[in-house]
Amino acid sequence: MKETYIKQAVEYAKELLAIPSPTGYTAEATKYLMKTLQDMGYNPIETTKGAVQVRLGGEGTDGLLLASHVDTLGAMVRAVKSSGRLRVSPIGGLNPSNTETETVWVRTHCGKLYEGTLQLENASVHVNAKLKETVRTWDNVEVVLDEPVKNAQQVKELGIEAGNFVFVEPRTKITQSGYIKSRFLDDKLSAAILLALAKYIKDQNLTPKNPLYLNFTTFEEVGHGGAANLPQDIQEFISVDMGCVGDDLNCDETMVSICAMDSSGPSHYQTVSKLVETAKREQVRYAVDVYPFYGSDADAALRSGAPVRHCVIGPGVYASHGYERSHVQAVEATLQLLAGYVDFCPAD
Ligand SMILES: [Zn+2]
């Protein structure tokens, strides 16, 4: 895989990560995907649920769909407290322990953004003797707005109310050593990799032998992203989602992970075997792992009744659903594996 496509994937990732898109508020991410794919010369479609699907070519009925999701964790205002602070409900698995002290933006129904910070109640260490031992929950971690508000009425006058989305600052950073640090690498890093794959296929004038689709879903974090709009001519569904990194696992942040089994059970053996064969042949940095607590769009597709072979692969991501970390080498490995996995027609 040429260096340019790896760099391009990282650029796409930076752009996507800069667009807030908690599940339920993904229209701006959808717009970005539509435009980026159209600019490449493709004809993507936007589904009713806001997913973006594009057919990259191919013929027959033995199609492959590669899915990643652009919805992320986030929160929603649940109540404006009498103190003028906001109680929030998490969207997806947003964790109060690792989100405390993060900058957020509250979006009013009129589209105005107000900055604030997620803080434990009574967050001054010089005042609160129990600060260290308090277990953080969404009942005691609140949004402190950076506005001169002291009661609920003043907050409501800003237009802030229950049902407003809360965007969490991703804090995207790419180090000199190639580490990619950001919230929501799950799964925007993979979405960026799929965009780079589409660009690679177009630039190199490659024609997939069998139908090849990219599907960018918008409801993965709440469990039903991959459940709808599946093309009739696919036989295989591969979720390109974050690869797990942690105790007992072989993958690290420089590899592509192949998931042999997640919380819903084993991946399809034929797909796993072909992925491993491809990784070996293409000399990709890879690991095969069992993910203890994990679900993906592929699981959602199967639950919706899709008769497909399935698997999950993706760049190794550490500290998932927190301040996540991956590496440019994992981007390269994932791209290499995908480009090697797809069968292309021989060049004329
Ligand atoms: Zn994910």
Image: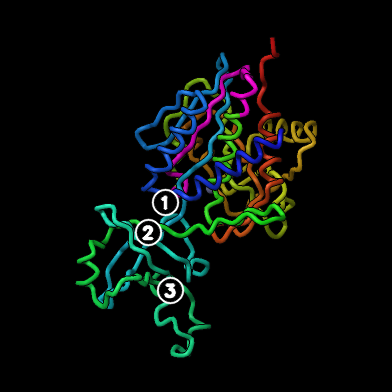
Q: Residue at x 19, y 72 (%)?
A: 153
| Earlier sequence position, callout 2 versus callout 1 | 1
Number of dots carrying numbers? 3
Residue occupied by mark 2:
166
**By what rule are the colours in the image chosen?**
rainbow
The reply to whether the C-beta atoms of the residues labelled 1 and 3 are less than 8 Å apart is no
Q: Position of residue 4 (x, y in %)?
A: 67, 36
Q: What kind of residue is marked 2?
A: Val
Which contiguous range is marked in magenta? Answer: 200-222
SS label for mark 3: strand
| Earlier sequence position, callout 1 versus callout 3 | 1
Is 54 left, or right, of 276 in this rendering? left
Q: Quadrant of residue 3?
A: top right
SS label for mark 2: strand
The reply to whether the C-beta atoms of the residues labelled 2 and 1 are less than 8 Å apart is yes
Q: Residue at x 29, y 75 (%)?
A: 148
Q: What kind of residue is marked 1?
A: Pro
Is 249 left, or right, of 225 in this rendering? right
Q: Position of residue 177 (x, y in %)?
A: 72, 55
SS label for mark 1: loop
Distance, label 1 to label 3, CA atoms, is: 20 Å
Residue occupied by mark 3:
119
Quadrant location, the N terminus:
top right
Instruction: Say above or below: 60 vs 273.
Output: above
| Earlier sequence position, callout 3 versus callout 2 | 3
